[in-house]
Amino acid sequence: MSSSERQLHLNAFVMSVGHHEAAWRLPESDPYADLDVEHFKNIARTAERGKLDSLFLADGPVLWDQVGRRPSGVLEPTLLLTALAGATERIGLIATASTTYNEPYNLARRFASLDIISGGRAGWNIVTTAGLDAARNFNLDELPAHKERYERAAEFVDVSLKLWDSWADDVVLADKESGIWGDDAKIYPAAHQGRFYKVAGALNVPRSAQGHPVLVQAGSSENGRDFAARYAEAVFTAHQTLADAQEFYDDLKRRAVEYGRDPNHIKILPGIVPIIGSSEEAAREREAELNRLIRPEFALPQLAGLLGVSPEELRLDAPLPDSLPEEEAIEGAKSRRTLVVNLGRRENLTVREIIARLGGGRGHLTFAGTPVQVADQIELWFTSGAADGFNIMPPVLPSGLTDFVDQVVPILQDRGLFRTEYTGRTLREHYGLPRPANRNVGSLQTAV
Amino acid sequence: MSSSERQLHLNAFVMSVGHHEAAWRLPESDPYADLDVEHFKNIARTAERGKLDSLFLADGPVLWDQVGRRPSGVLEPTLLLTALAGATERIGLIATASTTYNEPYNLARRFASLDIISGGRAGWNIVTTAGLDAARNFNLDELPAHKERYERAAEFVDVSLKLWDSWADDVVLADKESGIWGDDAKIYPAAHQGRFYKVAGALNVPRSAQGHPVLVQAGSSENGRDFAARYAEAVFTAHQTLADAQEFYDDLKRRAVEYGRDPNHIKILPGIVPIIGSSEEAAREREAELNRLIRPEFALPQLAGLLGVSPEELRLDAPLPDSLPEEEAIEGAKSRRTLVVNLGRRENLTVREIIARLGGGRGHLTFAGTPVQVADQIELWFTSGAADGFNIMPPVLPSGLTDFVDQVVPILQDRGLFRTEYTGRTLREHYGLPRPANRNVGSLQTAV
């Protein structure tokens, strides 16, 4: 057992009955679990038993895909995480929410409420929401351009930070004798007037145990990297190769420094879909079993949309067409498009094979192996300048998380790479991030 | 013990440490409880022990008043009720949310999520949100006019109903063998194009055990009554006299019938602030103690705002000015303004006395007496065509609710006016409302 100063951060990225799109077809899976709070409570308790930093829910304000394909109910994540807060004590709770389709006052307040209800365990995965279908649920006929979505996101976060700082930490006097509950001189209205938003007042929720929710980001385009470097305290990202992950890691840390930030205060967590078996062969057979259960006709239109082509231009048993729109021409999920194109070209895969490779992780690295092999892979990226930890995406739930917690986490703990007990109570403490000072008050307020 | 076919409906309207603005100053009160989920869980369990129909949280996207006055943190109610859903099994959970400052897709989805998480116990108190301060938190310089707020609210509810019906009840096939999870032919996109909203797609949350959340409304202006008659399944209202309550009750039932509705499917629940004592004298002393703890300088600006005058026009120890703006000139809470003016004129109260009378219930009836007297008052209104039940507003929490549940509820049960056990699981079942058919599918779907 070796020991290391630098510690891994592990986040459980949880979705329905697992990230593999065919997971629901396995005999073990409950096909109604996407709407069952007990299913998610069970998962949250398992992740907490594994001492993981956090639990993460993706989201979009739209019915994804066809309901034929897989379980399609998605409970709103700030609510679902509130339910999970009551079933857990320590683990961080990160919800995705869109800056394009929310109002800052409402969303900042919901995250502040989750942060207080959970005792300082909330995180916000800030997304700009790609896709015309979502835009059409919000009075729009067209998706706002990628660049404008990010400009709006930046102002949205600026407003949110003002609202989260609108109460000094010591507003409340609770002076029953004189009848003064709080000190109105320590309330700082947002007084924001910007290009996209005007928000005058103070929030009606005070600061939390961790100051404000941890800011998380997951876009890897040029606009996305710049945004992450400015604001993100944790970054979820997708890479198929160590070299790509290293490039991203170096680039993002460098950009954060250029913004005057401490590079240790932006944690980079690539996604990994671990398919765990008692032998390498058993793990590969499990992966093959899942891929055999995919119905590619459901995935084909989604792949075409990602690539910016019509479904008729793709043939299941042929490679990708030679000519595809460039990333610059895509207004949706830019970096994911490039990842998929590079994967198909590099390994000369057919469309059917690409769909199988995406079926598990939608672009995130799928890794099938024994618990030791999974731990080796995690350690390699962690010690090679590619990751501060991982976004663990179990292909099947709950079993894929239970296997990871019971079989991989103990190996990482034995190697001194991962905590054996929580040392803090807030998500910031788990991630090793300082409690932010209230910018209206100054550094005297900076507790840790 | 008599028995009655018609049963009372009782809702616990819960706010901080109680509805009386000075409740937090009592020795028994925890002045930090407004942000303590355990405080609210304790209250919710007490209400459920009393077999109450529902628990209700008011809300506004704004910091109310000065923080000097009283506890000012307000956790976002759909989140707080999600936390309470996990601490209870039967009681209905009603959250207030604004149609003026939300997007229909987001809000309909949050309520659908709460409804599923709670097993069909959700209700939505639909408000249009009066007040310039709220408007200025949402990009506006002026409060939208009263009439336009209600027109927007009507379309907002129409869109929400379309979204809640966008899944037939039998979408999910969960056919693992063929790999078909749901039947896409049973998904009905909202396809809404109206004056205020365009919402194209289907919700990503299916129908709940009760079809969709119960629609609640609390405005009593002309616009508010019309809106309630069209949409509301329960109405929270404020009256100081039996005659006013009877007029409102008759008027609203008649309007509902004119809209082709069954008048039994709109439950009218006036607010009551019960101040319970072992003797009438003890109850009156409790009321006086609470009123002595009010600091009127905090309440004066709020009263002036309600009346549409400047604070300088009011003098604490004088009656209301002879000349005040008419209800028609008010764009805020119209009916509450008229109630307060009538109260002051009818009883020739000074401004200080009006503030004391509003300090407990903000216009709702405050009733101090023994448990039998409180039960008598409830029975009188219930049997005199003034109420289908009551919105119970404890002046102090948790003690005011505990007293009501332990001392008043058993009397109402002995009289055969109130259930001794829950007979249903959903809020609709508690209120005696049918499960709505999916309007995309037709009456074949009408269960219950």
Image (cartoon, coloured by chain):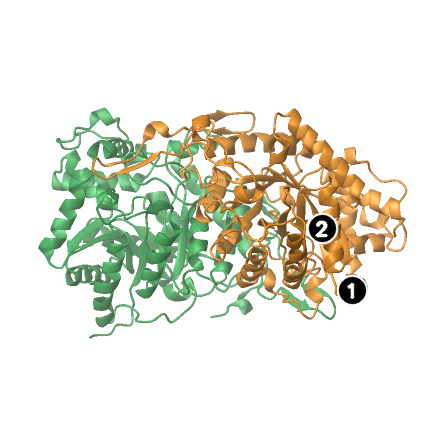
Chain colours: A orange, B green
Tell me where residue B186 appears, x and y as whole percent. Answer: 64, 61
Amino acid tagged 1: Ser
Q: Is residue B67 above or below residue A21?
A: above
Q: Which mark is residue A272?
A: 2
Tell me where residue A425 appears, x and y as whole percent. Answer: 49, 47
Which one is nearer the viewer's eye here, B51 or A58?
Answer: A58
Residue at figure coordinates x 40%, y 38% from the top left = A204
Residue at figure coordinates x 83%, y 43% from the top left = A341
Q: Is residue A375 above or below residue B129?
A: below
Left or right of A393 on screen, residue B165: left
Q: Can residue A320 be seen at all in this image of the molecule?
A: no
Q: In the rendered image, which residue does mark 1 sit on? A: A279
Which residue extends farthest left?
Answer: B281
Left or right of A285 on screen, residue B275: left
Q: Is residue B85 above or below residue B306?
A: below
Parent chain of label 2: A
User: Does label 2 lie on the same chain as label 1?
Assistant: yes
Parent chain of label 1: A
Q: Is residue B63 above or below residue B235?
A: above
Q: CA distance from mark 1 to mark 2?
A: 19 Å
User: What is the count of numbered marks?
Assistant: 2
Q: Earlier in the sequence, mark 1 or mark 2?
A: 2
Which one is nearer the viewer's eye here, B214 or B359?
Answer: B359
Name the quadrant containing residue B391.
bottom left
